[in-house]
Structure formats: C-alpha cells, structure tokens
Image (spheres, grey):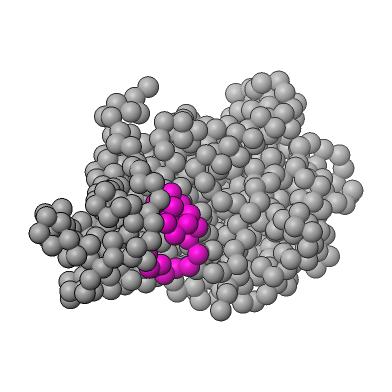
Amino acid sequence: MSQRILVAVAWPYASGSLHLGHLGGAYLPADIFARYHRIAGNQVLMVSGSDAHGTPITVKADEEGITPREVVERYHPEILGYWDAIGISFDLFTTTMTENHAAVTQDIFLRLLEKGYLVKGTSTQFFDPEAERFLPDRYVEGTCPHCNYPRARGDQCENCGRTLDATDLIDPRSRLTGATPVLRETEHYFFKLPEFADPLREWLESKTTWRRHVKNWALGMIDEGMPERAMTRDIDWGVEVPVDDLGPSKRIYVWFDAVIGYLSAAKEWASLIEDPEAWRKWWEDPAAESYYFVGKDNIPFHTVIWPAMLMGYGGLNLPTDVPANQYITFKGEKASKSSGIGRSIGWYADRLEPDALRYAIAAVLPEQNDTDLSDDDMIRRINEELVATWGNLVNRVLSLSDRNFGGTVPEPGPLTTTDEALVASIDKTLETAAGHIEAIELRAGLRAAMDAASEVNAYLNSEEPWHVLKEDEKRAATILWTAIQAISGIRVALSPYLPWTSARLGEMLGIGPKVTGWERPEVTGGSELGTVETLFTKLDADALDD
C-alpha cells in the first residue's frame, strides 16, 4: 500500500555559498531517501527553502550596506542552481519571504497565544551603546560557558552545539562594532516550553529506532530543564508580530519562523498544484510519515522546540524521525560558511560529473560520527570504486554484448546454478538496500549495491566470457545475459544515489531511463541495446587542484 512520506529538509541561510558539509549533512541524504521512496511507489513531498530571516543575512547586509532582501535575492538563485546541477529533487524549494509563509507563521503564533502557550514577559537583552541598537542573538559573540569555545554565537555554540542565550556568553562582544554590549530591559513574547517537558519526554522515549546521538541530545535538553524562550526579537527584518502590544521594531524570532517553513512550504506547494488542501494528506493524516533531514546543530530545534510548537498548535503530525547527521570536516575542522572552511558546492559541481560528486559524498555520509573529507579521498573513491568497480563492469559487459551479438542483449541458454545464484543474490541485494535506506542507513545501502557490483565482477572473472566466446558462443551469451540481469538490478539499487547515470544506463540496456519500481527489471534476450558509452570519467590526480 502506498505510504505518504514528508521529507523536510533544513532551510539554509541565503547569506552565502553552501559547501560540501551542507550537502552531506542534509540535502543529499534527503534526496537519496526521497528518490528511493518514489521508486518504491510511495507518495513523497520533499520541501525546503532559503531562510531569509536568519541573522547571518542581516549581518551580511550590514557589512555590505545593502538590504537583507538584496542578500537573499543574490544567494537564493545560486542555491537553486546547486539543486539543478546535482539533482536534488525538491517538490518545492521556496523562501521565508513569501506572503504565504508569513501568514502560516502568524497563524501558529496566534493559536499558541490563544491557548496560553505564548506569554508576554520582560527580559534583559544586549544593547550596543555605539550602534545604539538592541543586538539579535547572532550579533553577539563570546566564550561558550560550557566548552570555552571563544567564538560562540549568542544563540548556539558552533563547537559543542549547546543552545544558548546571549547573556550566557563569557566576555560578550558586539559583532557590529566590537564594543562590549550592555544589558537593557525589553518586552517580548515567551514560549512556555517547560509545559511540554513531560509529553516531549514520553514521545521521545517511544522513538526506539532514532539515532542514539539525536535522541540522547534531545532527552538531555529536557533533563537539564528548559527555560521559557523568547519568540520575538528587537529587529526590523522578519515576519511581523501579528499583535501590536509590543511596540515598533519587533519581529518573530527566526527559529520560530524557520521551522514553520516546512508547513508553509507544503501549503505553498498545494496552492501551486491548484489543490489547496493537498498538504493536509502529509500533515494531518496519522498514517503519514515525516522525516526531518538536518545537521546535528539543528537537533534541539527539530526534536524539542518544533515538536512542542506542534503539540501546542494541535492536529499536526509530529516528526517520525529526525536523522540528523554529524559534521563533515576538512583537515579536522568543521566545514563552515562563515569561517570560510570548505569549498562551495558550485565549485565542485563545475569540476565533477554530478553522480561522481554524489557518490563521493554518499560514500562518507557522517551518519554516526564526524567524517573528514579531502579532495584526494574524493578522487580516490571516484576512480577506485565508482569508475573501476561499477563503471568498468557496465562497460565491459555491454561492450562485449554489443560487439559480439549485433547490438542486442544475448539470448541465453540453460542457466547453471552459478548463474541462478548470482541473479538471486542481486534480488536479495535490492531487499537489503531497501532495508538500509528505509532505516536511513544510506552509506550501508550504497555499500550493499557496490558489493553486489564487485560480486558480478568476480563472477565475470571466474566465467571469462571473453574467452568462452571463442569456444562456446551460447555459453558466453548466457554468461553475458546473466551479468546484464545483475546490472539491471544493481542499477535500481544505485538509482537513488546516481540518478543521472542510472537513467543513461537504462537507455543503454534498452529499458528506458526511468526506474519504475524497486525490483530488478528483466532485460529480454534479443532486445536491442542502446548506444553503449562510458558512464564515468576517470579523474586525474590534480583534478581538484586550484
């Protein structure tokens, strides 16, 4: 029976180029997962967009003397270009600047206010005496009180990942002027997060299949005690507060508005397909599932704060899973847009074939631990694994068949037990890979497919059809037919990871570019092959040098 699957993907700040840490942390895993479920026959809605209201955008605007909107309008098209270049298959990638998003955000704000979960209160907030303005969290930097990282932000420490209030920082300083900020009282709306501690704990403890680091982090946050969190800020860029009792220059906090983007994007998508109520099938049907692909620094917002908001609002599905990845590091340092560590996705997309780039990242996805990545390692994996194992297998089997059997798939004779065992093994690989992908063990799913390719290579090396052709053409035809059936199955297992070359391979096999089900399509003996060509280009050692 077809399942509805919501694939909700982290919203990147449209304040600069994205790097491979972003790609491996959220976007490629989400795409692999979504593509698998579409092939398996499920109804997938994959949404995200550019976060237009994050403080990094206003920081960039202040630095360049332009408006925040101009910053977003520069980088949002660049981000869309990444998805086109490497095949990240969003149903909608929008922005938080739309009227739709503002309306959905304000609706949730008002519902929580009506139900008593948002209350007015006074807090002390940093004020820059030189700039003469209140400082949003990310305009304040200082030393983390938990890990002593000297460049912690006022909302979260990038080093240890703990959520913070700016007033927690040791030796705070303004990012605007470098001045030491002073505390002044200001009035805001606070979300009564502590009221959700017990239902959140009960819900989290029921999640027996979640990644351990995700679940433990969320439970630890609850056990430490959750303060009420201000959900408005003293800024003039963002979604307007839908009540007027706070005074001017107040906006909804970006982390309140950003997570609502998953819901507002679903509603926008429904409007675009001219079925305005379609979003409800993914958000209100208890049988629908929702998966949130984020990096580990987003765990608190997606496993505690957003679920609490959903509980407070009522009637909307809670996350089925939040498979947050760890970090991709470069020479031991976390990839960081703000720190300039790690080249952009676009830089690599200009130099690598899209599936080669996808493979190099998918093979090292940081699912359980931080993963260090280097250009040399990427080149090695592409050449030694993708090209030598999979690309070479396809090329030698189809080239032999094309040359020796008139451009057609060889007609097989009787199969030996070895032939039958190989085909059965490939069918088993599809089951294994499906299990891994459904469990969001995407590296293991890719490894299962590549191990199957190695198994076919071993079969060919043992059966040696290039020699058998000289003595027993029918047996050689059977060997090649068997290998083609195996390739057809492996193509299905690899298609969520390598969509571009899987489509080309389908045309080469004469079965069409689209993968239409999670099962091995039989390639009929005697049918015509398409034009046989090399799937991947071997890289020179200096291919990624500056």
Magenta stretch, residue numbers: 503-523
Q: Residue at x 64, y 28 (%)?
A: 60
Q: Is residue 399 visible?
A: yes
The image quadrant of residue 237 is top right
Q: Residue at x 64, y 36 (%)?
A: 76
- Horizontal and vertical percent for residue 90? 60, 51
Which quarter shows the C terminus?
top left
174 vs 92: above or below: above
- From the viewer's side, name the closer residue of 455 and 419: 419
Residue at 42 percent of width and 64 percent of height: 437
Q: Is residue 30 above or below residue 22?
A: below
**In the figure, residue 495 lies in which quadrant?**
bottom left
Residue 137 visible in the shown view: no
- Quadrant of the rendering where the N terminus is positioned: bottom right
Residue that sits furthest to the front in the current view: 406
Q: Is residue 325 left or right of residue 226?
A: left
Q: Which residue is painted at 21% across and 73% down in the image?
A: 415
